Image (spheres, rainbow, N blue to C red):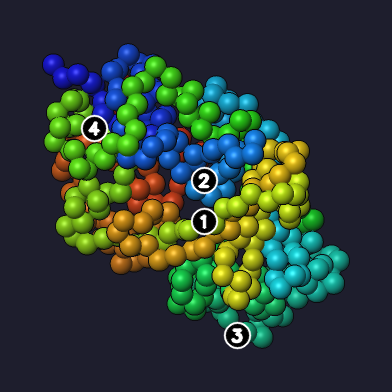
C-alpha cells in the first residue's frame, strides 16, 4: 500500500481545491510545489502592511452561487469592483468602454449618438467581416478608440501588431452603452480580506504540503509515494517538450514602495500608448481600500516566453491548439495521472472557472 492516495503537483487554486476535497473525503494527500510558497499565481505577500499580488492583479468575480459559497468558506470578501482606468499620454478614459469613455472621446451624451459614431467609423474603415484583431476592434468601438486605447496596449501585451493577431482575442471585449465602469459585470465580485494566500492556507489545512520541490526532477521517487497523481504544471514540460514547446506570453514585474499614501488613485491603470514600455501599473493597497502611510506599485511588462520563464497566458492560436491536442492525446494515455488547471490544460482560466474545474475533477475522482 502506498503512502498517499493522491500526489498533487502544484499548490495553486486547482491543486488546493482538489486537495481540500480529497482530504475531506478521507484521502491521504501530499501537495508539492517547486516554488517556496503556496497559492500559485494568486499568491499575495505583505509589504508595508499591504497585500501585494506578486504575480499580477487577481480580482475574484463569478456568476456562480456555488463557487461564491465555496470560496466563502475560506475567506470573507470585500466589495472591491474592478473599474480600471486607461491613460493615453495623460488623457484618462474609463474602462470597460462605456458611455463615460464615449463622452470623453467624442463629447456624445446618449447611447444613440455613441452607436452612430462607432457605426460611421466602422463604415469608413470598410470593414464587413473582421479578419484580424484590428478590424474586430474597429467594428466594436470605432477607429478613434482603437487607435488610442486598443492598438498600443494590445501590441505591447502580445508582442505583435494588431493586424497580425486573430480577431477572437478581442471578441469578448466589454462594450456598454451605459454609464457603468464595472468591468466584469459579475453577480459576485471582490478581494479576500487578508489576501489570497490566507484563503489558500485555509483550503490546505490538514494536508501535507512540501514546498521547493521540483516534481519533474524527482518524478520517479514522488510518483512511487502515491496511488494517483494530479498534475497542474505545464503539460508540455511533463512530457519533456518532446513534441515542441507550447507558446505563452510571460510578464515581468517591477515593484517598488513609495513614501506616499496614494500614487494613482486606482488599483489598475492601463497605459495604452505604444511609447510607454509597461502595460499597466497596479497600486495594490486600493484592492483592500488601504489607509497605510506608504504604497506599493507594480509595473507590468509583457514579454515573449521561453523555457525557464514563468508562463502566464497561453497563445491559443491554431498552431498551438494543434500542438496541445497532440499533448492531450499523450496525457490521456498516462495511467494514474490527471492533468488540470491553466497549465495542465493549456487554457486561460478565470479563478472561478479553475475552482469549478477542480471541483468537477474531485467529484469524478472521489465518487
Of labels 4 and 3, the one closer to you: 4
Q: Circle 4 is placed at which residue position? A: 229
Q: Quadrant of the N terminus?
A: top left
User: Mark 4 falls on what kind of element?
Assistant: strand
User: Mark 3 falls on what kind of element?
Assistant: loop
- Label 3 Cα neighbours within 10 Å, binned few <14 / some 14-19 / many ≥20: few
Separation of disc 2 and disc 3 at Cα?
Answer: 44 Å
Q: Nearer the viewer, residue 153 or 166?
A: 153
Indicate left or right for 325 with 362 as reference. Answer: left
Identified at 49% across, 48% down, the residue is 55
Mark nearer the N terminus (4 vs 3)? 3
Identified at 52% across, 70% down, the residue is 156
Q: Circle 1 is placed at which residue position? A: 253
Q: Circle 2 is placed at which residue position? A: 54
Mark nearer the N terminus (2 vs 3)? 2
Mark 3 and mark 2 in contact (Cβ < 8 Å)? Answer: no
Separation of disc 1 and disc 4 at Cα?
Answer: 32 Å
User: Mark 2 falls on what kind of element?
Assistant: loop
Q: Give residue 126's mark.
A: 3
Mark 3 and mark 1 in contact (Cβ < 8 Å)? Answer: no
Amino acid at each position: 500500500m502506498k503512502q498517499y492516495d493522491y500526489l498533487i503537483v502544484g499548490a495553486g487554486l486547482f491543486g488546493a481545491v482538489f486537495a481540500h476535497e480529497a482530504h475531506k473525503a478521507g484521502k491521504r494527500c501530499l501537495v508539492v510545489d517547486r516554488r517556496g510558497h503556496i497559492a500559485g499565481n494568486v499568491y499575495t505577500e505583505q509589504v508595508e502592511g499591504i497585500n501585494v499580488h506578486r504575480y499580477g492583479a487577481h480580482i475574484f468575480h463569478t456568476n456562480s452561487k456555488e463557487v461564491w459559497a465555496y470560496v466563502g468558506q475560506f475567506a470573507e470578501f470585500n466589495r472591491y469592483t474592478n473599474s480600471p482606468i486607461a491613460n493615453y499620454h495623460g488623457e484618462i478614459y474609463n474602462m470597460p468602454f462605456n458611455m463615460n469613455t464615449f463622452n470623453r472621446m467624442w463629447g456624445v451624451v446618449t447611447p444613440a449618438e455613441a452607436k452612430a459614431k462607432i457605426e460611421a467609423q466602422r463604415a469608413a474603415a470598410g470593414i464587413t467581416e473582421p479578419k484580424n484583431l484590428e478590424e474586430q476592434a474597429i467594428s466594436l468601438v470605432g477607429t478613434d478608440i482603437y487607435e488610442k486605447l486598443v492598438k498600443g496596449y494590445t501590441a505591447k501585451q502580445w508582442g505583435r501588431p494588431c493586424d497580425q493577431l486573430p480577431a477572437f482575442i478581442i471578441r469578448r471585449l466589454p462594450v456598454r452603452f451605459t454609464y457603468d465602469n464595472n468591468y466584469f459585470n459579475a453577480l459576485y465580485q471582490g478581494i479576500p480580506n487578508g489576501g489570497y494566500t490566507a484563503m489558500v492556507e485555509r483550503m490546505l489545512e490538514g494536508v501535507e504540503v512540501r514546498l521547493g520541490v521540483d516534481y519533474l526532477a524527482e518524478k520517479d521517487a514522488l510518483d512511487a509515494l502515491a496511488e494517483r497523481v494530479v498534475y497542474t504544471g505545464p503539460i508540455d514540460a511533463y512530457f519533456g517538450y518532446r513534441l515542441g514547446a507550447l507558446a505563452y506570453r510571460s510578464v515581468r514585474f517591477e515593484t517598488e514602495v513609495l513614501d506616499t499614501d496614494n500614487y494613482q488613485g486606482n488599483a489598475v491603470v492601463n497605459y495604452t500608448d505604444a511609447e510607454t514600455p509597461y502595460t499597466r501599473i497596479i497600486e495594490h493597497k486600493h484592492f483592500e481600500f488601504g489607509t497605510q502611510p506608504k504604497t506599493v506599485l507594480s509595473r507590468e511588462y509583457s514579454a515573449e516566453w521561453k523555457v525557464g520563464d514563468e508562463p502566464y497566458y497561453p497563445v491559443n492560436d491554431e498552431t498551438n491548439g494543434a500542438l496541445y491536442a497532440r499533448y492531450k492525446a499523450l496525457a490521456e494515455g498516462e495511467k494514474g495521472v490527471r492533468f488540470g488547471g491553466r497549465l495542465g490544460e493549456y487554457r486561460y482560466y478565470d479563478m472561478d472557472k479553475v475552482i469549478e474545474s477542480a471541483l468537477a475533477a474531485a467529484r469524478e475522482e472521489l465518487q
